[in-house]
Image: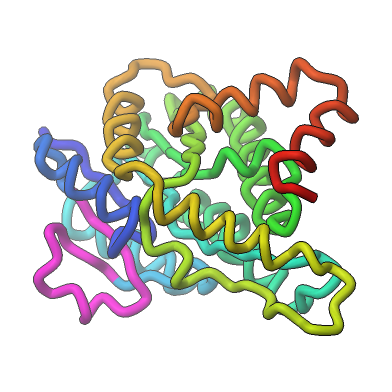
Amino acid sequence: MSKVILITGGSSGIGKSIGEYLKQHGFIVYGTSRSPEKYANHPFKIVGLDVKDVSSINNAVAEVIANEGQIDVLINNAGVGITGPIEEIPEAEIKNNFDTNLFGPINVIKAVLPQMRKQNSGLVLNITSIAGYMGLPYRGIYSASKGALELLTEAFRIELKDFNIYMANIAPGDFATNIAAGRYHEPLKKDSPYKKYGSVLKDIDDHVDNSGDPIAVAKTVLKVIDTKKPKTHYKVGDFMQKFSIVLKFLLPDKIYEKMLINHYKL
């Protein structure tokens, strides 16, 4: 029997790439969007879900279970980017980022766990970010929200071990998606003391525009689904992006910090 996959944020970008790839490999795939009516001709079915609305989450999960009788894999992919000097980002935008990137995934996980326990099987994959392994300048809020999700998974894995439910993080680097279009970025202010923010923002956008195909993330997702006992952490990106995490754990803090400063020309 085909496994049933639920992907939050499956309407575009990495989520769409994952969904198309899994459907091609015989899975039953559901994606989510706050506006499902826009995706009548999508490659896979889209259900309505707003990760910041618990009722919306519960209704979407109930719809999938009603249709298929099961949910085998949850992929927490919905997320938003945010850039800017931490001092200047409005509190409301910081809260919105954590609501989407952290509290939303927590609530979707809570919604699927009773069904997975009932099945005595399940897999949750959290799409985090290589940025979640380090505090990146002018991306500090994004790093923090994704880093928190990484740690949450470590705790969840231990709590779920008796129920035959597994959880893993997949941390992508930069991939060519439309994430910049939906990202909040603090406007460049003429009177801001953070004069170097503009050059860092341009560097971030250039990296996304010139990055690889998100199919690499989809292939890693399939690999993890086919793994009997998944690891906690998987990284997907170019060599230097993944190696930066290794250096983070090997080098003294001040030397690693200096490397980041040099990289961003700060």
Residue 44 within the segment the image draws in magenta: yes
In this picture, residue 74 sits left or right of residue 1: right
Residue 209 vs residue 216: left or right?
Answer: right
Q: Position of residue 215 (x, y in %)?
A: 27, 40
**Residue under the point 76% across and 74% down:** 89
| Image x and y of residue 264, in percent | 71, 47
Indicate whether 114 appears above or below 79: above
Residue 70 x/y as whole percent? 25, 45
Q: Looking at this view, is 132 or 226 the one in front?
A: 132
Residue 184 is inside the magenta segment: no
Q: Quadrant of residue 117?
A: top left
The residue under the point 15% across, 40% down is 27
- Of residues 161 and 33, the one nearer the viewer is 33
Q: Assign the N terminus to one quadrant of the image.
A: top left
Number of residue marks: 0
Which residues are the magenta region? Answer: 29-47
